[in-house]
Image (spheres, rainbow, N blue to C red):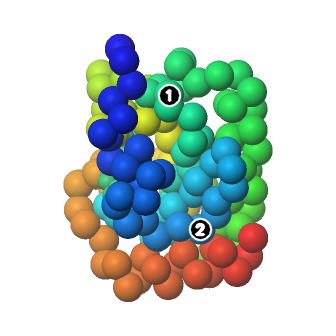
Amino acid sequence: MAYDDQNIFARILRGELPAIKVYEDDKVLAFMDIMPQAEGHTLVIPKSPAETLLDLDAEDAAYTIQIVQKIARAIEKGLDAKGIVLMQLSGASAGQTVPHVHFHLIPSSIHELGRHAATMGDTDKIQALAEKIKAAL
Ligand code: AMP
């Protein structure tokens, strides 16, 4: 399917919508999930216009996973996370709701994950968690 350049993450990448960013370079952006399944739920996205992992260029995939690891380390250090769930949904049938490939880093346990993209978080609290992650980068 053709990439929809009006999806929420494409609009965040163009600066048309706000995001609580924790990391950005020329290829990747990491920002806080606004409906977190746990405190510190962070999203990492490549800037290239790919809908799912299956559409992503291999080089972009390799680079993005390095940043996923970098952010995971910052979450562990900055939030004293004991474990992190890495989740990636490819396709609406898998539950993907935003059609721009992204990796979820959720400091939680698979046994305790909350409902997906269900409840808006407290922005001030999310911002404070983002500052801790940024400080640990
Ligand atoms: P998925 O269902 O895997 O596509 O995940 C999309 C994620 O994006 C969900 O966890 C949502 O809570 C999150 N989300 C939706 N809109 C925004 C937004 N504007 N800023 C940050 N996260 C968002």
Under tag 2, what secondary structure?
strand
| Most foreground residue, 126 or 18 | 18
> The disc labelled 1 sits on which kind of residue?
Ala
Q: Is residue 87 left or right of residue 77?
A: left
> The disc labelled 2 sits on which kind of residue?
Val
| Residue beneath the point at 40% across and 83% down | 125
Q: What whole-number distance in Å separates the C-alpha atoms at marks 2 and 1? A: 21 Å
Q: Residues within 10 Å of mark 1 (few under 14, many from 20)?
A: many
Checking the image for residue 64, the label placed there is none
Mark 2 vs 1, N-terminal side: 2
| Residue beneath the point at 42% across and 65% down | 19
| Most foreground residue, 55 or 12 | 12
Which residue is tagged 1?
50
> Is any part of residue 5 visible from this angle?
yes
Which residue is tagged 2?
22
Q: Nearer the viewer, mark 2 or mark 1?
A: 1
Q: Position of residue 97 (x, y in %)?
A: 30, 38
